Image: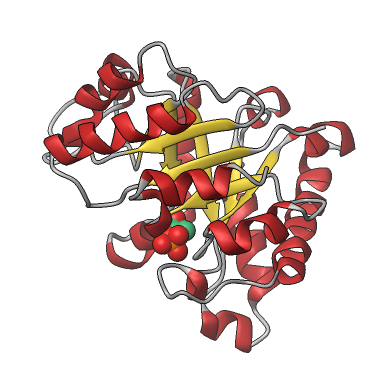
Amino acid sequence: MRKKFIAGNWKMNTTIDEAVALAKDVVKTMGNTSDVDIAICPPYTSLYAVSEVLKGSTVKLGAQDVHWEAKGAFTGKVSCAMLKSVGVTYVIIGHSEQRTYFHETNETVNKKVKATLAAGLLPIICVGETLEERKSGKMDAVIESHTVGAFAGISAEDALKCTIAYEPVWAIGTGETATPQQANEAHIFIRKLLVKLYGTSTAEQIRIQYGGSMKADNAKALLGQSDVDGGLIGGASLKASDFAGIVKPV
Ligand code: PEP
C-alpha cells in the first residue's frame, strides 16, 4: 500500500515574509498530518526561513531544482549540499517549465537525480507530454523517454527513494485537468515501464503523483484512482486552505 504524497510547488512566488506566513498557515492546518506525506517547495531564497517554520511539524521541505555539480563556477546554481544545509528533504527535478524554458533534457534530469540520491535527498521526477505530443500520438514515447532517461543507471534500491510526478504539460496552470481515467492510464503506463526497469515488487512501491490543475474539487476523484499516489500542486498550493482542501480527501 503506497502512502499518498502531496507536494506544493510554489514556483517563483513569495518573498521571505510571504513564504513564512504561508508556511505557518500550512503548519497550522496540516502540521500534524501523518496519514499523508506533505511537502512544500518554496523558492531558494525562502528555504531557510521556511525550514525554521516547519521544525516540529510533519510537513517536509522541498526545493524546485538543483545543480548536479558539487561546487564551483556555476553562477546562479545551487548544489545538493547547499539544499541539505537548509533542511531540504525533496527536490523537484525535470519540471516541464525547466524543460521548456531552461534547456532541461533527459540527460540533465538524470545527472540531477544521481546527485540528489548521492546526497541523501529524495527526487520528485517530473514527466509528461505536451498537447501537441498527445495529439500526434507521441504521448507514450515521450513519457517513456522521460522515465527511462531519468532512471538510467539508478539502482532498484535508489529508485525506491524516488517519486514520479506525471504532469501533462497541457494541464499545468491552465485550469484544464486530465480526467481521473486519463491520469490513471498514464500512471499505469509509467508503472509498467518501472516493472520493465526494476521488476514488479519495486515498481509497486514507487509513488506516482499527478500534477496539473489539481484542486480541492477534483482531488478526490483523481486521488481515488488505483495508481494515483498523490499530487504535485502548483497554483492551489499558494493558499493554505486550498492546499488543505486537496490533502483532506486523501
Ligand atoms: C506544477 O507546476 O507542478 C503544477 C501542477 O501546477 P498547477 O497545479 O498550477 O497546474
Frontmost residue, 41 versus 222: 222
Task: Estimate the x, y position of residue 163 in percent, counting from the top left.
Answer: 60, 39
Would you place residue 43 above or below residue 80 in this image?
A: below
Establish if 233 lies above or below 51: below
In the rendered view, would you say 129 is above or below 21? below
Q: Residue furthest right?
A: 200
In this image, 178 relative to 3: left or right?
A: left
Q: Quadrant of the C terminus?
A: top right
> Splitting the image into 4 quarters, where does residue 21 fall?
top left
Residue at (76% x, 45% y) in the render:
194
Q: Looking at the image, which residue is at 27% across and 28% down?
A: 79
| Residue ranking furthest to the bottom | 136
**Which quadrant is the N terminus positioned in?**
top right
Nearer to us in this view, 167 or 148: 167
Q: Residue at x 62, y 52 (%)?
A: 147
Q: How many marks?
A: 0
In the drawing, does residue 38 fall left or right of residue 47? Answer: right
* Image x and y of residue 177, in percent: 57, 72
Measuring from the top left, give residue 161's x and y in whole percent.
61, 27
Query: Ligand 1 falls in which quarter?
Result: bottom left
Q: Is residue 98 left or right of residue 20?
A: right
Residue 22 percent coordinates (x, y): 28, 38
113 or 33, nearer to the observer: 33
Q: Residue at x 36, y 38 (%)?
A: 41
179 versus 24 height, above or below? below
Residue 166 visible at all:
yes
153 relative position to 102: left or right? right
Whether residue 93 is visible to the viewer of this picture, yes or no, is no
Colour scheme in the image? Answer: secondary structure
